[in-house]
Image: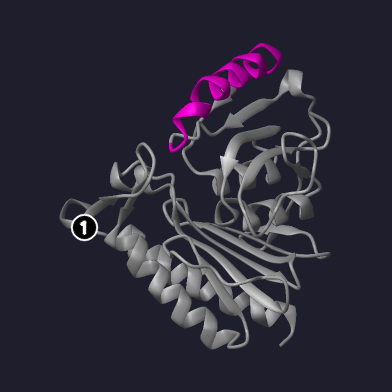
């Protein structure tokens, strides 16, 4: 299947899942807690993940599927693998904050290959194919050319890892003094796309899982940005790590 056709099929599935988010009856949704502070999962997370699993594996039956709401994850080292967050920003979704996205990353032989991040509230579909650039609603996007001193810093507070909270805010304060201001959306995938689209110059979070960043990281890289761990190493796709994303200048 040609990359354009494959990407089109994936975005169709993701858009369908976005409609479920838009029309969700949140007040009637069961909310469960996972390990860690303020780590929630709703029946919509589970429902959307089931749809993604079924529909994406119909598109690429040979792929493995790695979803956030699963206990056991298959190896992504060989062949295709979907790495999926059905609702990135679940707390936002519960609170009707309109900063939640569906994130689907596709890897090939352990490397990022395609990324799709969709915010149904704004109807913004971010996409990328390795080596072909990044797009927002089919139009090309690129990171900003502004230095950090004239930029916005986005950050995640890692609420599930209380031992990281103080350091997160200390880092945010340090960046606050160097930049125009700081922002906190509650969705790492959306923050990565915001840097990709030139809306901000830097994003960091001390601990994330692959489904939080695989799609957004490729979109940012294809938009001309740079993504590493806080230590400067490559992101790990089989296990979580810290994330530092910039426009390559900041």
Residue 235, percent from left and from top = 72, 49
Q: Count how many numbered circles sit on residues in the image.
A: 1
Whether residue 55 appears in this view of the structure is: yes
Q: In the rendered view, would you say 227 is above or below 23?
A: above
Q: Nearer the viewer, residue 26 or 77?
A: 77
> Under tag 1, what secondary structure?
loop
Q: Residue farthest to the top?
A: 177
- Horizontal placement of 78 versus 71: left or right? right
Quadrant location of the C terminus? top right
Q: Which residue was labeled with disc 1?
A: 25
Whether residue 200 appears in this view of the structure is: no
Please rate how many residues cluster around mark 1, counting C-alpha atoms within 10 Å: few if below 14, some from 14 to 19, many from 20.
few
Residue occupying image coordinates x 40% and y 75%: 51
Q: Nearer the viewer, residue 162 or 99?
A: 162
Q: Is 59 part of what is drawn in magenta?
A: no
- Horizontal placement of 65 versus 108: left or right? left
Residue occupying image coordinates x 28% and y 62%: 43
Q: Is 174 part of what is drawn in magenta?
A: yes
Quadrant location of the N terminus? bottom right
- Kindly report the secondary structure that dominates the magenta region of the rendered protein: helix
Q: Nearer the viewer, residue 137 or 107?
A: 107
Residue occupying image coordinates x 78% and y 65%: 130
Q: In the rendered view, would you say 209 is above or below 1?
A: above
Q: In the rendered view, would you say 40 is above or below 185?
A: below
Residue 148, percent from left and from top = 75, 23
Residue 117, percent from left and from top = 56, 58
Q: Which residues are magenta?
A: 160-181
- Horizontal placement of 204 versus 53: left or right? right
Q: Residue farthest to the left?
A: 28
Q: Nearer the viewer, residue 240 or 152?
A: 240
Residue 108, percent from left and from top = 73, 73
Residue occupying image coordinates x 70% and y 37%: 244
């Amino acid at each position: 299947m040609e990359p354009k056709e494959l990407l089109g099929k994936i975005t169709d599935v993701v858009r369908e899942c976005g409609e479920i988010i838009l029309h969700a009856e949140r007040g009637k949704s069961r909310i469960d807690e996972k390990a860690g502070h303020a780590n929630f999962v709703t029946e919509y997370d589970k429902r959307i993940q089931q749809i993604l699993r079924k529909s994406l594996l119909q598109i690429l039956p040979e792929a493995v599927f790695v979803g956030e709401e699963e206990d056991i994850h298959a190896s992504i080292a060989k062949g295709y693998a979907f790495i999926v967050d059905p609702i990135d920003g679940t707390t936002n979704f519960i609170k009707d904050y309109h900063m939640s996205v569906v994130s689907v990353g596709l890897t090939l032989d352990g490397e990022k290959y395609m990324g799709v991040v969709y915010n149904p509230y704004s109807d913004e579909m971010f996409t990328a194919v390795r080596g072909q650039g990044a797009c927002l609603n089919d139009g090309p996007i690129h990171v900003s050319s502004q230095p950090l001193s004239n930029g916005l810093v986005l950050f995640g507070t890692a609420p599930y890892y209380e031992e990281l909270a103080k350091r997160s805010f200390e880092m945010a304060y340090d960046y606050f003094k160097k930049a125009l201001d700081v922002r906190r959306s509650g969705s790492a995938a959306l923050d990565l796309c915001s840097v990709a689209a030139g809306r901000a110059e830097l994003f960091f979070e001390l601990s994330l899982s692959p489904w939080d960043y695989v799609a957004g990281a490729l979109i940012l890289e294809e938009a001309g940005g740079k993504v590493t761990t806080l230590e400067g190493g490559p992101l790990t796709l089989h296990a979580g790590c810290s994330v530092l994303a910039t426009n390559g200048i900041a």
